[in-house]
Structure formats: structure tokens, C-alpha cells
Amino acid sequence: MIDYRSLENVEFDHIVSCMKEAFSDYVVPLNFDRDYLYQRFTGQNVRFDLSYGAFVEGQLVGILLNAIGNYNNELVAYDACTGIVPDYRGQGVFKELMAFTYECLAKEGIKKYVLEVVQDNTRAVETYKKQGMILAKAFACFKGKSNEALDSSFTYEQRPMSKEIYPIFASVLNYEPCFENRIDVIETYIKDYEVIYVSQDKDIKAFVIYNKESGEIKILDYKEDISLLKQLVLVVSNQFDSLRIVNIPFKREDLIDMLEQLGFDHFADQYEMAKDL
């Protein structure tokens, strides 16, 4: 018999072990380092008391980790990780775990459920559609290091992020960040981020906000001259062995073209899918 319950009191190492088995055949290679995963889930505001698992005789065979946050002016739950170990696939575990999750989250006042799925994973896309989810947005994902040289004459400013200066840069942003890169994540973990930018007469011309430890770029944009943003990305790239720049909206073809021209690996495209609870 399969038991569905909260992951609040489950050791994180058991969750990681379940992930490794569940994603052993996943289309995109994943980083299963424990500390990396813990930092990533913490940064997303994963609530383990509002995350759920499938158990067989006490063994974790499926997980659904939920991050909670304000997104597009709604209290939303975001599927930070879902996985069913191979031996229990095709038995309705995923469907029952999702239904259990929707019911529990709705009781907590969550208004919408969102997730991201690799576009090439057509089986998963169709499965989520059967659960009542619709396609909402499309994103491009990049990683790696640029192969271009930085202009040695380029000048810029760099400083730690703060809640006081964040609105200045957010006002330049001309697209809606995905759930993982939303404003309240940056504000909640403000000490983890730095901003690099170009300004003229106190007017921001281009900027990049990134995690100072991992090099993950959260948001970036420019006003008129994309070459300024290009140089800023090169500056950040020179500081790390590899960058992660995920979920650039498809509508921002200018940013996607820039990152491809810089030589970053366009490793995946994703859909954001959503369901009202």
C-alpha cells in the first residue's frame, strides 16, 4: 500500500537518494550534490512541510517538492522537483501524488500551481496536461562559459545587492522573471547576490544580478545598447568557471541571440505550465 504524506520530518539525505533514482534516466543531466541541492531548494523557498512524498513500507519512492512565493500577484506553489523511482512508474503514483498535493495546498490558501518542464519531454508535457495544467510561458536555458574576450577598456560598477537599490534595477527590467528568479527570492536572500551595471548620470543603462557564490545569473537587461549588457555578461563569465542563465523568455529574442553569440550552451528550452487550485 502506498502512503502519501508531508516531507516535513524526512531527512534531506533520503530525499536526495530518491531524486538520484528517480532521475537516473532523465533527458537533462542533473547535479545531485547534496549541498548544491540544499542551497538551491533553500533559495527557491521550498517548504518541506508543504512538500509531499509517496511511501511504501516507509521507503520514499516518489517526491514532489514545493516552493511557495508571490508570483504575478498571487500566492503560488512551484514544483521545484517531482520524481517517481522507476519501479513505481505506470502504477498511478504520480497522478495520486499530484492530486494529494493539490488538495493539501488548496487547504493552505495556495491559489495556483506552476511548474517547468523541458519542451522535448513530450511525455511529461502530455501527462501534466492530463492533470489540468496549461502551457503558460516558454523559456530558453543556458550554461557554460563565454568564448569571447572582454573589451579591456570597458568600465562598469559592481556592488552587493540591497533591498534599497533593487527597485532601481527592477525598473529597467523589460520582462517578467520566472518563479525561480522572481523579485521576492532576491529580496529574501539579498546577501547572496551582487549587481554589475553601467550607468550614465545615475541612469542605469544595463545590469546583471547574479549569485556571488555560484555565478548563476538571476536577471539581466539593458535600455538601448545591448553591447553594454554583452560586456557585463563577459565580466561575470570571467569570474566563474561556468555560469547558469536559465529561463530567458522566448519573446526576448535579443537576449537569446546575444547569449548564443557569446558561446553559451543553449542546453534546453522549457515550458512553464500552470493550474488554478
Image (tube, grey):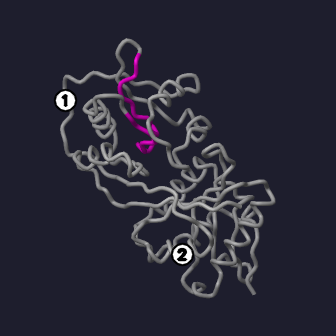
Name the quadrant of the N terminus. Answer: bottom right
| Left or right: where 203 falls relative to 33 | left
Kind of residue at disc 1: Asp
Out of 63 and 98, give the one closest to the viewer. 98
Q: Which residues are magenta?
A: 203-221
**How far from the left and from the top, in percent, is residue 198?**
34, 23
Magenta-span inclusion, residue 97: no
Q: Residue at x 68, y 64 (%)?
A: 11
- Disc 2 crowd, CA 10 A, few/some/many (<14, 14-19, 20+): many
Which residue of the protein is positioned furthest toward the right in this rendering? 107
Q: CA distance from mark 2 to mark 1?
A: 45 Å
Element carrying mark 2: helix
**In the rendered picture of this protein, how many numbered marks are placed on residues?**
2
Kind of residue at disc 2: Ala
Q: Residue at x 51, y 45 (%)?
A: 181
**How far from the left and from the top, in percent, is residue 59?**
69, 78
Residue designated by label 1? 151
Residue designated by label 2? 22
**How far from the left and from the top, in percent, is residue 131?**
62, 73
Against 219, residue 169 (above or below) is above
Out of 236 and 174, give the one closest to the viewer. 174
Element carrying mark 1: loop
**How far from the left and from the top, in percent, is residue 154?**
23, 24
Name the quadrant of the C terminus. Answer: bottom right
Out of 179 and 42, give the one closest to the viewer. 179
| Left or right: where 18 falls relative to 270 | right
